[in-house]
Image (cartoon, rainbow, N blue to C red):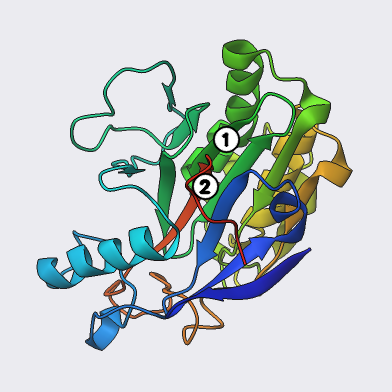
Amino acid sequence: MFHFARRGPIEYLESEEISALGFVTHAFCTRRGGVSIGPFSSLNLGFLTGDRVDDVRRNRALVEEAFGIPDGRLVLIKQVHGDRIRVLDGNGPLPDGLPECDGLITDRPSIALGIRTADCVPLLFVDRARRVVGAAHAGWRGTALGIAATMVETFAKGFSSRREDLLAAVGPAIGPCCYQVDAPVFEAFSGLPGAGEFFRPCREKGRWMLDLVLANRLGIQESGVPSENIFSGGPCPACRQDLFFSHRASGGGKAGRQINLIMLRDGDCPKNT
């Protein structure tokens, strides 16, 4: 189950099941609690949206302060709508710049993995036995490529994670109420198990309504994670632009990006409240 919480000015959603573990900080942040103005109001973390760079930097600092993220330890990526995963293990340096990928996994404490969204699906993972965390960005292309299952496989191969030890939280994303797609998107999903479950009829010929959250839930489940270990929640961003940025509903795509993050805590990091 998900519920809303607050740290200072920042409002966010969290999974009660992940919070109960006691060693993970995580959040699906809303757009509230930052300093940006206009269509980027207010907690915009997207540097390439047209927002003022100084405001985005200040928003990043607010996130780091609110969630107890050490300076320079919030790792963001250049999301490319694919299925590439970057693993941050060992004691080496963190990536220089923004690595081009759509997923991050680490067993290192006090490193926050950040995914930015404005309709796409944010996925957060925890291996509760081996204490490994991951975050992934799943747009329709990444979902069709099976990035959710690729994350599970990377946990298994890279950290010997057992699927029954994995917890997965599927955050707020555009819903089938608002996400209309065309034939090329429909065809990209045609080979996935359960494809008939996450497409819904549309009044327009040659178009369908796509449930991206369900598609990713099923992808995680098909990879062997028990259904009771998969959690989802939160409103559709396109329906609730007061809470979330929505690229599709903004008109012309002028929208900010909210951040979704997960971090293994050490003794110096505060717990979620």
Q: Are marks 2 and 1 in contact (CB under 8 Å)?
A: yes
The quarter of the rendered structure image containing the C terminus is: bottom right
Residue 60 falls in image quadrant: bottom left
Front one among 91 and 148: 91
- Let me know if residue 177 appears in the view: no
Mark 2: give few (<14), some (14-19) or many (20+) Cα within 10 Å.
Answer: many
Identify the residue at image location x=57%, y=63%: 173
Q: Is residue 125 above or below residue 203?
A: above
- Let me know if residue 166 appears in the view: yes
Mark 1: give few (<14), some (14-19) or many (20+) Cα within 10 Å.
Answer: many
State which tag comes first along the sequence, 2 or 1.
1
Residue 152, x across and y down, in percent: 65, 27
Q: Give the residue type at disc 1.
A: Val
Front one among 250 and 192: 250
Q: In the figure, is residue 193 to the left or right of 152? A: right
Determine which residue is flagged by label 2: 262
The quarter of the rendered structure image containing the N terminus is: bottom right
Q: Which mark is residue 133?
A: 1
Q: In the figure, is residue 59 to the left or right of 232? A: left
Residue 164, x across and y down, in percent: 83, 28
Disc 2 to disc 1, C-alpha distance:
7 Å
Q: Give the residue type at disc 2.
A: Ile
Identify the residue at image location x=79%, y=32%: 225
Q: In the figure, is residue 52 to the left or right of 132? A: left
